[in-house]
Amino acid sequence: MFKPSSPLFSGLLWKIPWRISQPQKARQRKRLRAVDKVVDTVSAALARQGQTTKAVERWYREMPREEEMLPRDKYTIFDKKEKTYRKGIHKLPKWTRVSQRVNPPGF
């Protein structure tokens, strides 16, 4: 006889919690700081040679550092389909590889 459980009734049941956990938050902050450190290292190496690049200058101009970011921007991203226009960053596929520092103004 058919038993209507969630996985049997509707296929694979993805269990992603609605809230990001504390260890996930800590790892996210660590990743953001690591990217900041890499950009600083590249900038310092270029400065020692008396050079600079447009990409590094643009990064400093447009991207906030980890300590300057609001928690809302660190752990959530803009999504036009959501009711509040924000969703947890852990719901984004490959969220550990994508930079989501800048969101639309006002959201």
Image: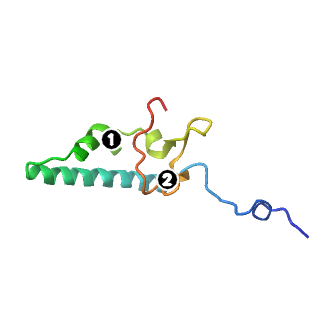
Q: Residue at x 47, y 29 (%)?
A: 106
Q: Which residue is mark 1?
A: 63
Classify residue 30 as left or right of residue 15: left
- Measured in 3D between alpha carbons, the distance from the residue under mark 1 to the one under mark 2, in whole angstroms, is 24 Å
| Residue 14 rendering spot, x and y as whole percentages | 65, 59
Q: Residue at x 9, y 52 (%)?
A: 48
Amino acid marked by disc 2:
Gln
Q: Nearer the viewer, residue 3 or 105?
A: 105
Q: Amino acid at mark 1?
A: Met
Query: Can you give x and y, in whole percent of width and height, for residue 95 in the image?
Result: 47, 54
Q: Is residue 64 left or right of residue 52?
A: right
Question: Considering only order in the chain, which callout, 2 or 1, is on the residue closer to the N terminus?
Answer: 2
Rendered residue at 43%/44% (across/down): 74
Residue that label 2 marks: 22
**Quick one: SS at disc 2?**
helix
Give residue 18's position: percent from left, percent from top: 61, 49
Q: Quadrant of the N terminus?
A: bottom right
Residue 21 vs 84, above or below: the answer is below
Q: Identify the residue at the far bottom of this view.
A: 1
